[in-house]
Image (cartoon, grey):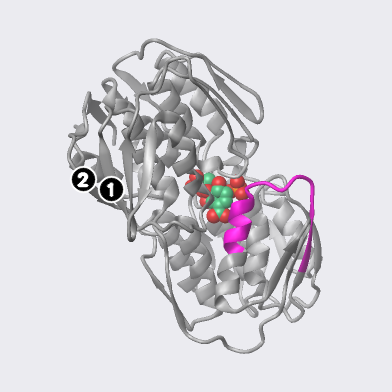
Amino acid sequence: MDIHILKSSVPNRQVQIEITGSKSESNRLLLLKALYPEIAINNLSNSDDSELMQKALASNADVIDIHHAGTAMRFLTAYFSIREGSEITLTGSSRMKERPIGILVDALKQLGADIQYLENKGFPPLRIKGKKLTKSKVTLKANVSSQYISALLLIASRLDNGIELTLEGKITSIPYIQMTLHLLGQLGITTNFDNNIITVNPQTKDLKSQTFIVESDWSSASYYYSIVALSGVGTELNLTSYKKDSLQGDSVLSELYKAFGVNTRHRKDSISLKKEVEVKDKEVIDFDLRNAPDIAQTIAVTAFGLGLECSLKGLHTLKIKETDRLVALKTELEKLGGKVTITDQSLHLSRSKSINDNVSVNTYNDHRMAMAFAPLGLKTTLQILDAEVVSKSYPQFWDDLISIGFKIK
Ligand SMILES: O=C(O)C1=C[C@@H](OP(=O)(O)O)[C@@H](O)[C@H](O)C1
Ligand SMILES: C=C(OP(=O)(O)O)C(=O)O
């Protein structure tokens, strides 16, 4: 499904958007619930990735296909490695088969896991025979994806001797590791993260029942930050349900978007985003996004929409996400008239004066390409190709845009 966005505007009235729970928190809690059934979860994400995670955990099939869901692929590899008596094939989309998993598989093998590659070494699909893992010491490279680390931490408390992880290299996407540790702590599991060593104690007893209320997804909120940034002074949107003390690293949006003139106010369980000031053309956006890689596309497109120069670094994980996001951003921004240079871990956008209209934006099976470029509909007319990709994290995205005034055909 391709969609046309006609040049739109967001009316200057209070509009409320309800976003469902964080995909990252939901997928962690779903795995923990499989290990500790006494957990209940409220405000679960309605993303495809969380639905796939739920289905996979309940499945008795021999082959489990998790499509494009990276966290599900990584977390379930760990989970099925310890599910005694089961033997399954874990596979995904053709892109998933290009997303590396060797670091996690090697770490699980250090613990004694039985995992085989069915196609290419280091990549899905995997054949996993579940067994009891009794070793506890693991060393792994921490600069490629934090998801490998979270996967190990999530199963750690169900190992006889817990886990002692030694992390090598500069740790990436740290807030996601802290989110995992925080949820374990909330469950009553003892953990420690000191320098480059993380320990998780074994949990032999059942835990007391409790309900986790998932905070709404901050990565999804980023598209509204962009919309407000690209709108006139005074434009305001309210988003539910958000907290001041978030577990999600992408909540750094409330700080970062001040550079685009957007102010965030926390209400009881919502946030209000307001465009307070116009940004001067000579302003330069300069961010390190090592801890918040999923908002890189949103920020680059906002800067482009405002004609601002923008330097982003810490983007080394973008090459192995749903698509190579650095190349995808450069290609699509240049079609719209941007001038972009990229390295393996950075992107530079030059200041620009105009935006080409009627451009068809390719989305490369990447939900964030579709959602990051959509706010440009406030500046020009554009087409978003394969717009249904948004369902990976935010199925009702297009309906929500229509509800705030976007003209979509
Ligand atoms: O643990 C998680 O929930 C995630 C970790 C991040 O991945 P990397 O650690 O690979 O950067 C992030 O990009 C992804 O969308 C979700
Ligand atoms: C990178 C992402 O997801 P995953 O790695 O879980 O596929 C994302 O949602 O931006």
Mark yes or no: residue 237 visible: yes
Q: Quadrant of the N terminus?
A: top left
Query: Start and end of the magenta stretch?
Result: 164-180
The residue that mark 1 highlights is 238
In the displayed structure image, the side of residue 5 where residue 211 appears, left or right = right
In the shown orientation, is residue 100 left or right of residue 355?
right
Are dots 1 and 2 in contact, CB under 8 Å?
yes
> Mark 2 = which residue?
15
Q: Pinpoint residue 328: horizontal percent, then vertical percent.
A: 50, 28
Is residue 44 left or right of 160 when viewed as pictured? left
Q: Is residue 386 above or below residue 269?
A: above
- The residue positioned 29% from the left and 21% from the top of the image is 379
- Residue in the picture at 39% in, 64% down: 44
Task: Tell me: 187 left or right of 190.
Answer: left
Locate the C terminus and report the quarter of the image it occupies.
Answer: top left
Q: Residues within 10 Å of mark 2 (few under 14, many from 20)?
A: some
Magenta-span inclusion, residue 124: no
- The residue sitting at the bottom extreme is 205
Instruction: Give the amino acid at mark 2.
Output: Val
Badge 1 amino acid: Asn
User: Which residue is drawn at the image coordinates 35% and 28% (left, top)?
Assistant: 277
Q: Is residue 124 visible?
A: no
Nearest the viewer among 355 and 17 is 17
